[in-house]
Image (spheres, rainbow, N blue to C red):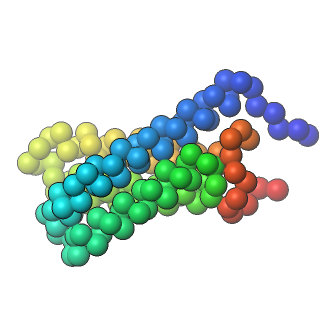
Amino acid sequence: MENTQSIWQIAAILIARLIFAAIFLMAVSFKFMDMGATAGYIAAAGFPLPLFLAWCAAALEVLLVIAFLTGAFFTPAALIGSVYVIFLGFSFHGPSHWAGNQAEFGFFVDHFTFLAGLLFAAVHGPGSTLAIRAGWRSRV
């Protein structure tokens, strides 16, 4: 049985991949513009080695952008991105931040909607168009 996708499905998948890539590209761009500020934000959250962690986050985000744009290692990238996004939600916008600023709750919830999209993408893959077929195989 041949698995064919309609034009709107192909477009939706490609747009979703572009949105994922754009979000991580914006995040890494802000890091590269002022790595010291990112390190300060990480230090304020109580993490050790903030500059090292800022560079690690930037490297991860660059790899995620590449994976979402190319489709290579798409499923593991989406799963890793899922863990990363929920970690960020709890670490920087979790319950301990809500008393000081109610907007933090909204930021926290936004991470769960992003998580849902990434998990859905991990299950369904990068689509059949403009996708490099490299990575873990979950289906035959």
**Is 57 on the left or on the right of 100, as rendered?**
right
Residue 40 placement (x, y as % from top left): 15, 62
**Is 115 on the left or on the right of 110, as rendered?**
right
Residue 23 placement (x, y as % from top left): 40, 43
Compared to residue 55, the image places residue 105 above or below, namely above
For image coordinates 45% across by 56% down, the residue present is 62
Residue 30 placement (x, y as % from top left): 28, 49
For image coordinates 83% across by 38% down, the residue present is 3
Q: Is any part of residue 2 visible from this angle?
A: yes
Residue 81 placement (x, y as % from top left): 47, 56
As drawn, which residue projects farthest toward the right? Answer: 1
As drawn, which residue projects farthest toward the bottom? Answer: 48
Question: In terms of image quadrants, where is residue 49?
Answer: bottom left
Compared to residue 3, the image places residue 135 above or below, namely below
Q: How many marks?
A: 0
Quadrant, the C terminus: bottom right
Looking at the image, which is closer to me, 3 or 116? 3
**Is 84 on the left or on the right of 98, as rendered?**
right
Q: Is any part of residue 124 visible from this angle?
A: no
Looking at the image, which is closer to me, 61 or 107? 61
For image coordinates 41% across by 63% down, the residue present is 59
As drawn, which residue projects farthest toward the left? Answer: 100
